[in-house]
Image (cartoon, rainbow, N blue to C red):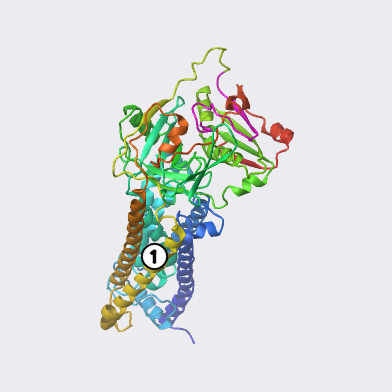
């Protein structure tokens, strides 16, 4: 028996339905996998999170995982979007007017029930899926807007664009806020719960960092180096060790234990830490990371970073500082951090020898390492110290002034007691200056700042017991969020919807959940931050105030003035031998690292900034 034309069309439509159903299923699964990547996307960028140290990561080393997850998420989300666009085009859901044959196909769709989307329509009735914002279903428009925000961040995060146009990359990445909002509107509350933990932890961390960054910190002084670099010296909350601050008496090896009960529990950090800096007079929105060059053990109340004059932001900072008077000026600065490596400094002491290789400004992480080793070498309980070889490469001889920062003091005049340090410096451009020609050794320009009453030392955001406070903030804010959502569902949504999910709008429910998330995080984080800020201010009043430094103060005195502690304590009398005697400078060629490492037989190496 010969089939009628309608039956033939139905069979043909069934074949078409089969691959269209598979296409729709694949599109959904691509979106699900992208959501799983998005669930982990925000965890690596939560700088103050307690999860990163648990797995041995730092805020700097975890960025690569954020990049990998972001690339995977955008690949899946882009494929998810294109599959649905192709699916809508193949089922004629992008056009305004439908043909009779397409209406017959829609009747087959309705009978077969192979697709879970609402595809049935009447002849001639318009249905445009790409501009569809369903009241109680998935919002396609929100998904498209989220995809556009993600594509903008993805494109500007490409290595070539990020390096050449960092400001474009930085500002474009603020689209993560509409990306989260539109993604939640597209997914709905139920699916967004998979992404919620990572977003919640990131929101807590971001809120605490925002509160801390609003405060101005006390900038003590700056040094303009001849090479164009700037050293910024901040005051920080002084460290307290069992009620005593350990130091050294001048001229002998006896310990000096000075009572420091007036000190607050200070800020501690490990070598190679990173500090984010914002200077409002240069740019109110830009934050830039820099390596900390000071040691919290050797300099208990000072925190220092070195900024190289390279780029628009650093050039404007250098010009701003150089235009200030030598003393009495003021520069408003905000900071985030410092963020320290989880491993700490102890693993470095397990080795017999250390080799550190740097290029240019890449020497800054090693300055903090050497200063910490100087402190450890001055402690009597330290049995032995590793031998240290620093191989540093500079482009010009003017950059040799970076070596003066290795040990606190004026121009590297101090030595390194009990520390076997050897420095091999290579200048790739230029030749060795003639004897008696010290034109490249220009003096540093020192700038002193007058502190304002609102300026505070750099201190932990949540006090000395930061991890306990962070756990309390996370648990309390999440409990408050659940309580608000439960009250919303029980007393507002349920009387209207009766758990049908077909009456109350999805968009309104999602926005209310996001609002409660922000309110709970901001409320609990703000309360904890203000409590610790008041407590730190009360304890800080116990510290004896001083008027400020003078240009005639010695470098050692400067180190202990910064925090305003006023406690009389001194470091060990250092000069056993000048640092210059341990330094060999080579002009006109690069180092032969292979021969140096093989000849020295060193067993540990760390490289920074070597090109």
286 and 375: which is toward the camera: 375
Residue at position x 46%, y 31% in the image: 555
Where residue 37 sits: x, y (%)?
48, 62
Q: How many marks?
A: 1
Residue 532 is inside the magenta segment: no
241 and 176: which is toward the camera: 241
Q: Is residue 89 above or below residue 64?
A: below
Secondary structure under the numbered disc 1 in the rendered image: helix
Residue at position x 43%, y 34% in the image: 558
The quadrant of the image that shows the C terminus is: top right
- On screen, residue 558 versus residue 403, left or right, reads left
Most prominent secondary structure in the magenta stretch?
loop
Where residue 476 sits: x, y (%)?
38, 68
- On screen, residue 353 versus residue 7, left or right, reads right
Residue at position x 32%, y 69% in the image: 513
Where residue 610 sits: x, y (%)?
57, 36
In this rendering, does residue 560 appear at all? yes
Which quadrant would residue 304 be assigned to in this image?
top left
Which quadrant would residue 510 be assigned to in this image?
bottom left
Q: Is residue 536 above or below residue 226?
A: below
Q: Is residue 117 above or below residue 225?
A: below
Give the magenta-colored segment's residue range.
405-430
In this rendering, does residue 583 appear at all? no
Residue highlighted by disc 1: 89
- On screen, residue 392 versus residue 136, left or right, reads right
479 and 195: which is toward the camera: 479
Where residue 114 sits: x, y (%)?
44, 78
576 and 131: which is toward the camera: 576
Crowding at mark 1 (Cα within 10 Å: few <14, some 14-19, many 20+): few
């Amino acid at each position: 028996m010969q089939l009628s034309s309608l039956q033939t069309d139905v069979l043909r439509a069934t074949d078409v339905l089969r691959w269209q159903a598979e296409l729709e299923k694949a599109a959904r699964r691509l979106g699900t996998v992208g959501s799983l990547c998005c669930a982990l996307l925000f965890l690596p960028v939560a700088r103050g999170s307690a999860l990163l140290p648990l797995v041995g990561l730092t805020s700097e080393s975890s960025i690569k995982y954020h990049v990998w997850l972001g690339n995977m998420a955008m690949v899946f989300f882009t494929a998810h979007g294109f599959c649905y666009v192709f699916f809508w085009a193949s089922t004629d859901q992008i056009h305004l007017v439908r043909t009779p044959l397409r209406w017959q196909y829609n009747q087959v769709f309705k009978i077969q029930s192979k697709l879970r989307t609402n595809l049935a329509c009447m002849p001639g009735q318009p249905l445009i899926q790409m501009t569809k914002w369903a009241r109680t279903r998935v919002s396609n428009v929100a998904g498209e807007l989220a995809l556009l925000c993600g594509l903008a961040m993805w494109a500007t995060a490409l290595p070539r664009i990020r390096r050449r146009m960092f400001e474009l990359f930085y500002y474009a990445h603020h689209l993560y806020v509409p990306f989260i909002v539109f993604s939640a509107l597209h997914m709905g509350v139920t699916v967004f719960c998979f992404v919620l933990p990572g977003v919640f932890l990131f929101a807590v961390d971001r809120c605490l960092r925002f509160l801390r960054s609003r405060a101005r910190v006390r900038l003590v002084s700056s040094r303009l180096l001849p090479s164009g670099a700037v050293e910024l010296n901040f005051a920080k909350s002084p460290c307290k060790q069992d009620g005593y601050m350990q130091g050294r008496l001048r001229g002998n090896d006896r310990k000096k234990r000075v009572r420091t009960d007036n000190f607050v529990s200070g800020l501690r950090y490990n070598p190679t830490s990173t500090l984010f800096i914002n200077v409002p007079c240069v740019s109110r929105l830009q934050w830039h990371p820099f390596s900390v060059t000071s040691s919290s053990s050797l300099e208990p109340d000072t925190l220092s970073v070195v900024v190289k004059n390279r780029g628009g932001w650093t050039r404007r900072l250098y010009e701003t500082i150089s235009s200030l008077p030598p003393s009495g000026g003021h520069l408003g600065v905000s900071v985030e951090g410092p963020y320290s490596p989880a491993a700490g400094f102890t693993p470095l002491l397990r080795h017999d020898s250390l080799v550190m290789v740097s290029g240019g400004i890449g020497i800054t992480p090693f300055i903090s390492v050497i200063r910490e080793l100087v402190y450890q070498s001055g402690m009597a309980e330290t049995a032995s110290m590793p031998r240290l070889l620093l191989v540093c490469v500079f482009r010009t001889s003017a950059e040799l002034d970076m070596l003066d920062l290795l040990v606190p003091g004026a121009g590297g005049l101090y030595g390194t007691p009990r520390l076997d340090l050897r420095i091999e410096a290579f200048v790739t451009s230029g030749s060795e200056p003639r004897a008696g020609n010290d034109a490249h050794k220009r003096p540093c320009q020192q700038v002193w700042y007058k502190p304002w009453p609102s300026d505070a030392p750099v201190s932990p955001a949540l006090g000395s017991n930061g991890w306990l406070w962070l756990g309390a903030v996370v648990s309390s804010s999440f409990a408050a969020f659940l309580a608000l959502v439960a009250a919303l569902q029980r007393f507002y949504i349920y009387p209207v919807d009766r758990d049908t999910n077909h009456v109350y709008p999805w968009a309104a429910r999602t926005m209310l959940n996001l609002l409660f998330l922000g309110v709970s995080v901001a409320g609990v984080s703000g309360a904890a931050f203000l409590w610790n800020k008041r407590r730190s201010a009360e304890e800080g009043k116990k510290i004896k105030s001083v008027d400020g430094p003078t240009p005639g103060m010695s470098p050692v005195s400067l180190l202990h003035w910064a925090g305003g502690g006023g406690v009389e304590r001194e470091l060990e009398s250092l000069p056993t031998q000048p640092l210059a005697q341990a330094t060999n400078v080579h002009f006109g060629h690069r180092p032969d690292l292979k021969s140096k490492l093989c000849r020295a037989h060193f067993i540990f190496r760390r490289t920074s900034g070597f090109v």
